[in-house]
Image (cartoon, grey):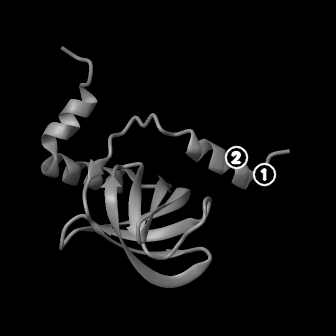
Amino acid sequence: MVSTENRLQQNFTNSDQRYLPRWEVQNRVVYSSDRDPYLHEAHTKDLSCAGACLRMHEPLAPAQKVKMTVYLSENISVKLDGVVSWVKPVQNQTEVGITFYNTPMKVQDLILEHAFEFKQEDLERQWFKGWK
């Protein structure tokens, strides 16, 4: 029998075909995990309404839950719950794939609005890929 944690890890590993595009942004992130309640800082490598890739110095483990605040700008931030889907060491940092869950529509809309203002052409290209 496959444990819930293993199923989560398998699902996240097979999620390369993303419906929602991710935008390359370097937003400040403050987070804590279910295994470490202290606040840590990271930065996004990319971000979407459904997840993000974070660059950090503290290692996290697959299936670990995190609570985070992502700063979309100096004055605008969103609070998100996520789970680690993958971890990859890169030079002196670690890249961590986070899948968001229980994200309110208002927060998703705010992320999308910010991304649209920041990378309007990329967003339109992704949404209308294959259309003529």
Q: Which mark is residue 3?
A: 1
Q: Are marks 1 and 2 in contact (CB under 8 Å)?
A: yes
Q: Secondary structure at mark 2?
A: helix
Side of 73 relative to 52 (left or right): left
Circle 2 packing at 10 Å, graded few (<14), some (14-19), many (20+), is few
Residue extending farthest to the top is 132
Q: Secondary structure at mark 1?
A: loop
Residue type, numbered disc 1: Ser
Q: Which mark is residue 126?
A: none
Side of 88 relative to 118 (left or right): right
Q: If the image is split into quadrants, where does the C terminus sit?
A: top left
Residue type, numbered disc 2: Arg
Q: Residue 55's spot in the image, x, y percent?
A: 39, 66
Residue 17's place in the image compared with 30, above or below, is above
Which residue appears at 43% of the width and 80% of the height?
40
Which residue matches tag 2? Answer: 7
Q: Residue 81's spot in the image, x, y percent?
A: 48, 63
